[in-house]
Image (cartoon, grey):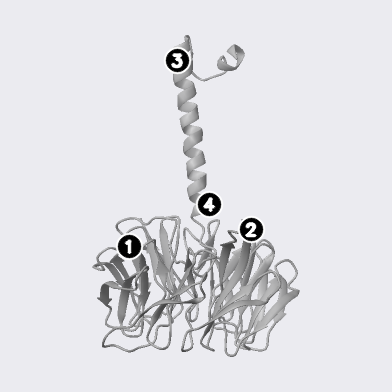
Amino acid sequence: MKKYFELLPIKLTDTKEIIRYMIIILSYILALFILNIQISFGNWVSFRGNQQLTGVAESQLPDKLDLLWTFNAFGIESTATIYDGTVYVTALDGNLYALNAQTGESRWNYNAMAPIKSSPSISNDVIYFGDETGIFHAVDINTHKKKWQYTTEGEIVSSANFIDNRVLFGSYDGFLYCLDINNGDLIWKFETEGYVHATPSVWLHKNDADSNVLNYAIATGCDGYLRIIDIENGTQAQMVNLGTYVGASPAILDNQVFCGTYGSEILSVSLDEGDITWRYQHPELKYPFIASAAITGDQVIIGGRDKLVHALSNQTGEPIWTYRAKSRIESSPVIVGERVFFGTTRGLIIGLDLSSGELVWEYETGDAIVASPSVSDGRIYIGNERGILFCFGKK
């Protein structure tokens, strides 16, 4: 030990100095450890940020947001994903773009040869997305090349979700698919009675009888049903009639699912009981909900074609506040700390105070926004229909 301390750049002559220096070293190591955790939490690797599609960011944003960079593609309707310092975004020009998260400069691109509305999802250094012709792509991040492809019989707008070695997505051919994540082999497919536009969420259900965790895919579709599918074998465990077709993806908090419908309602469904626990409908405005919900421990936040953002109690469905955006909202909101962000078809990116619904920030992009925000490492990203991807953060 004495020989070790003789190598240090300062002279340590007594025990107190040695202890003080060791505290400095340990503090530095701890700071690096915390920083590493924050970086790993900063990744946004799927459409709504996690398996349950809650739309809640783990990373924080600065109080003041500055435009840091833009990137021009052709038509963006998908949500960008961010992984280890690279932003991945798909576009209607048929390309998956990989961009430097700091500068927005292009690193590489992959051409799917068909328009892409499906948001890219990342697992184990592979990016997954579908295209307009019904081809589901797996692209290796390291080689920038196709790993495998799987062909369905309809357009794929649904984004991918993952559990263990399986990837889940829906297609306009009416099927929910489960493929082997490594080679694209079909494990099972479940036939619904309409398009599967939405991204399936994953419900990790703990069986109280034997403490086992059972994995279910929760799928909403244009057939008007919410389906609970056993991911192990593709069999349907439960089906809930929602009364009308649904384009929004289901968001899960605990054992409750929240989604909006084309029937102008926002619904809460109990997965344990398999029934609707509450319904909300604006007393005057009757417009569809296309966007998916963002959920916290006590609020459901969702925007609609009624030009309003609704904040509801997730326990009762009672309204907490509404915000009038003056244009349709098809962009799914993202909650970041005490704020919620979304885009509008008028081209505005808007930030609201989560508790009051008051406007705290907005930015005009120049074209309609149907894509949803993504948040990583203190920055927020969103694209518009003109094909411009915007990055905001602290200069």
Marks 3/1 in contact by CB < 8 Å: the verdict is no
Q: In this orientation, does residue 306 appear?
A: yes
Q: Which tag, 2 or 1, sits closer to the chain's start?
A: 2
Q: CA distance from mark 2 to mark 4?
A: 28 Å
Residue 57 picture location, percent across and down: 43, 60
Q: Which tag, 3 or 1, sits closer to the chain's start?
A: 3
Residue 370 picture location, percent across and down: 42, 80
Marks 3/2 in contact by CB < 8 Å: the verdict is no
Is 171 in front, or is 379?
A: 171
Within the image, what quadrant is residue 325 found in?
A: bottom left
Q: CA distance from mark 4 to mark 1?
A: 22 Å
Observer-side mark, 2 or 4, equals 2
Q: Is residue 17 above or below residue 113?
A: above
**Which label sits on residue 339?**
1
Amino acid on which disc 3 is placed: Glu
Amino acid on which disc 1 is placed: Arg
The residue labelled by disc 4 is 40
Amino acid on which disc 4 is placed: Ser
The residue labelled by disc 2 is 212
The residue labelled by disc 3 is 17
Marks 2/4 in contact by CB < 8 Å: the verdict is no
Q: Secondary structure at mark 2?
A: loop
